[in-house]
Image (tube, coloured by chain):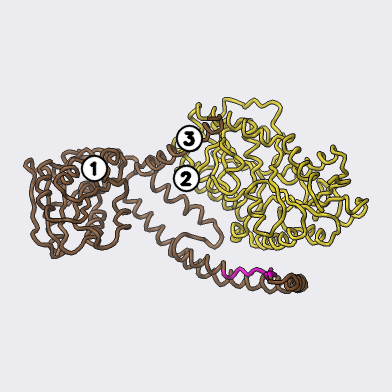
Chain colours: A yellow, B brown
């Protein structure tokens, strides 16, 4: 099917987060294929409002209903869902998955309710869609629980840096990149560090990402104080791309103990820079890392500390993890993802 | 084999090594036990409503899950028309259902809050007890180093013959633990005793097949009551605290069948102190009880034929008996 326009809908558009980066990349790619493509948002973001349109403006951008595909990025509850259910144009989903509500219930019940609402919306959206694109097999499996829909797995594109020369001479540094959220299990990383520093006193942990809930943020800061780790653990908050690159440059090992990942962009970013990866194996983590990292089946502090110590001190292992990660990251090269995306979108049969 | 496959198997091996190393460090005290124990607790202090792990916690979770009402009414139906009608009704009434279910869920959460407070109080008591225990405990790493001296103790070979005779009429399973050397086990097995060992270190597992690498208390905890036909208690009388020695003894009695043949091998307290030296003898939290004490304990259980045999060099005592 040759679409004249493929317009994307997203709950909120922000540069720098995984969904926002994907949306921007898809828009640019679709335009390069000769498709008209704009971004419509459920909630406006001041920083990106020049690039987006309100939902109601879609009519100005549709020339032929049959030749226009509406592509909705599902990541949270949004007014986009109800709006799209009423539209006559063909609808496709890009399913990024959402955090299971039970992981957030104690910390932020209102967000947990919103996620339940998102699940409810998804059932109706699946019924109405001609196609679903999922970031991972895990996401495809989750989506299938919401109803039958033709789906394909296309990972998120992650561009490798043109050059990457890690800085040397600093303390061994464990890096985590992602939101400070309960499901990301930052607390498990912090507790593991309290064990690791007994054997590697100079080790440091950098947690790079924006806070999400105040309670969890306070819990992490309280835990760091209680374990006397304020000199060891740094919470940077949100950083721009330039600062993020500096964080990667100084990282000795990338580690995530997240309880739920639909894909895991930072894992690929780390692998693309040759940073050894240590991760807790669950949800889509093993599908993203493949055979290129130390995948732990337990995240007991003793196990995580021993794994990090090994990755930080065994240079032969670190080199092999690094080489393996570089090879693995090529699977997420934008040109490969673009080819898969073209096949999914333009070879879809809607008869 | 491709690079990727080769890496995959190598990384799996490394992870297995890491897990074994973590286990070793945890059990040896390289990673301080008190710290490991406190980490989860430390974080849970910050979790809203103090969710803690025990039976009460699971019950509360179950109540919370049950109170969490989904406003989306199922629309499945045997006929497409029925499904369509249900879907329309759901769409039309969704605002109402959502309003009601949110209130029910909020009520559920409020109901579980007092339970969580009670739960937190209980856990606080446990924490204080654990802290109290730690105050009486010297540094785990130092203890581990000092205790290494004890593991070199080995019971006299002459006990093998006596125990072979003691268990000669026992046909069922006999446990020996905590095991620190395999010679006695081999002697008894060669004498036809249906015996197996439980050792807290994996070093012995490679030498003989019927040794299980497991904490003795964990192993006894998993055993069914009255499943043993006999036991030899060793190791723990040499280095366990009085509480540990008595706990092991009680558990073994519980797991033994009536009439079971039992034995306790215990180093003589003077030998123990002389071999360890004054520092270890003072700082280690365990010290052996006298053979007379074991005799007394067995007699109090109405055991018959309680006998104390001293090794020829007086370093060890063997106490044997038959349970009622």
Q: Position of residue A23 (x, y in %)?
A: 77, 45
Magenta-drawn segment: B66-76
- How crowded pointer 2 is (Cα within 10 Å; few <14, some 14-19, many 20+) is rated as many
Whether residue A152 is situated above or below residue B77 in the rendered picture: above
Q: CA distance from mark 2 to mark 3?
A: 12 Å
Which residue is at the front of the view, B3 or B242?
B3
Provide the major secondary structure of the magenta segment.
Answer: loop
State which mark lies toward you, 1 or 3. 1
Q: Please name the residue shown 31% across and 45% down the image.
A: B213
Number of the label disc, if any, that sits on residue A309: 3
Q: Position of residue B117 (x, y in %)?
A: 50, 67
Which residue lies under the disc numbered 1?
Answer: B180
Q: Is residue B83 left or right of residue B299?
A: right
Q: Which residue is mark 2?
A: A301
Which is more toward the observer, A76 or A168? Answer: A76
Residue A140 drawn at (x, y percent): 66, 51
Label 1 resides on the chain identified as B
Q: Is residue A120 magenta?
A: no
State the residue in front, A88 or B181. A88
Is A119 on the left-hand or right-hand side of B314?
right
x then y, percent, for residue A110 = 67, 62
């Amino acid at each position: 099917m040759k679409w004249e326009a493929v317009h994307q809908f997203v709950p909120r558009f922000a540069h720098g987060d995984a969904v926002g980066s994907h949306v921007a990349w898809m828009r640019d790619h679709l335009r390069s294929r000769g498709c008209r493509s704009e971004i419509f948002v459920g909630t406006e973001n001041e920083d990106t409002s020049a690039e987006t349109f309100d939902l109601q403006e879609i009519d100005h951008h549709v020339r032929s209903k049959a030749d226009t595909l509406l592509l909705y990025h599902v990541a949270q509850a949004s007014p986009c869902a109800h709006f799209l259910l009423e539209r006559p144009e063909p609808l496709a989903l890009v399913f990024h998955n959402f955090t299971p509500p039970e992981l957030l219930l104690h910390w932020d019940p209102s967000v947990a309710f919103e996620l339940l609402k998102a699940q409810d919306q998804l059932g109706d959206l699946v019924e109405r869609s001609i196609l679903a694109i999922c970031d991972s097999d895990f996401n495809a499996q989750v989506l299938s629980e919401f109803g039958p829909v033709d789906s394909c797995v296309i990972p998120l594109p992650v561009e490798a840096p043109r050059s990457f020369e890690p800085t040397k001479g600093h303390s061994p540094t464990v890096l985590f990149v992602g939101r400070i959220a309960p499901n990301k299990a930052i607390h498990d990383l912090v507790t593991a560090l309290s064990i690791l520093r007994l054997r590697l006193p100079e080790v440091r942990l950098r947690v790079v990402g924006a806070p999400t809930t105040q309670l969890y943020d306070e819990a992490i800061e309280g835990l760091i104080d209680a374990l006397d780790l304020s000199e060891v653990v740094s919470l940077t908050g949100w950083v721009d791309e330039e600062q993020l690159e500096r964080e990667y440059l100084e990282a000795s090992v990338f580690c995530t103990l997240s309880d739920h990942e639909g894909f895991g962009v930072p894992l690929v970013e780390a692998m693309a820079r040759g940073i050894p990866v240590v991760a807790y194996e669950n949800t889509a983590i093993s599908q993203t890392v493949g055979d290129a990292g130390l995948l732990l089946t337990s995240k007991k502090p003793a196990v995580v500390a021993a794994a990090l110590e090994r990755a930080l001190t065994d240079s032969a292992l670190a080199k092999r993890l690094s080489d393996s990660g570089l090879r693995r990251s090529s699977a997420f090269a934008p040109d490969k993802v673009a080819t898969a995306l073209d096949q999914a979108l333009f070879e879809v049969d809607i008869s | 084999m491709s690079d990727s496959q080769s890496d995959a198997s190598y990384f799996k091996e490394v992870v297995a090594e890491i897990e074994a190393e973590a286990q070793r460090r945890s059990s040896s005290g390289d990673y301080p036990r008190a710290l490991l124990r406190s980490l989860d607790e430390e974080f849970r202090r910050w979790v809203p409503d103090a969710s803690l792990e025990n039976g009460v916690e699971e019950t509360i979770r179950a109540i919370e899950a049950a109170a969490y009402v989904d406003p989306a009414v199922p629309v499945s139906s045997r006929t497409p028309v029925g499904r369509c009608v249900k879907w329309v009704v759901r769409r039309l009434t969704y605002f109402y259902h959502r309003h009601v279910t949110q209130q029910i869920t909020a009520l559920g959460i409020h109901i579980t809050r007092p339970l969580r407070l009670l739960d937190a109080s209980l856990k606080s008591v446990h924490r204080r007890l654990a802290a109290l225990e730690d105050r009486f405990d010297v540094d785990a790493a130092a203890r581990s180093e000092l205790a290494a001296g004890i593991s070199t103790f080995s019971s006299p070979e002459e006990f093998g013959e006596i125990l072979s005779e003691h268990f000669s009429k026992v046909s069922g399973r006999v446990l020996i633990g905590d095991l620190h050397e395999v010679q006695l086990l081999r002697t008894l097995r060669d004498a036809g005793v249906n015996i197996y060992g439980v050792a807290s270190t994996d070093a012995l597992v490679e030498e003989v097949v019927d040794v299980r690498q497991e904490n003795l208390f964990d192993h006894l905890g998993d055993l069914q009551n009255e499943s043993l036909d006999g036991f030899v208690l060793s190791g723990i009388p040499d280095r366990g605290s009085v509480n540990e020695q008595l706990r092991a003894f009680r558990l073994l009695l519980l797991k033994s069948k009536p009439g079971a043949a039992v034995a306790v091998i215990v180093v003589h307290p003077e030998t123990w102190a002389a071999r360890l030296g004054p520092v270890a003898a003072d700082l280690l939290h365990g010290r052996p009880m006298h053979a007379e004490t074991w005799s007394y304990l067995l007699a109090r259980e109405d055991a018959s034929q309680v006998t104390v045999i001293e090794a020829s060099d007086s370093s060890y005592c063997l106490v044997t008996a038959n349970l009622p």
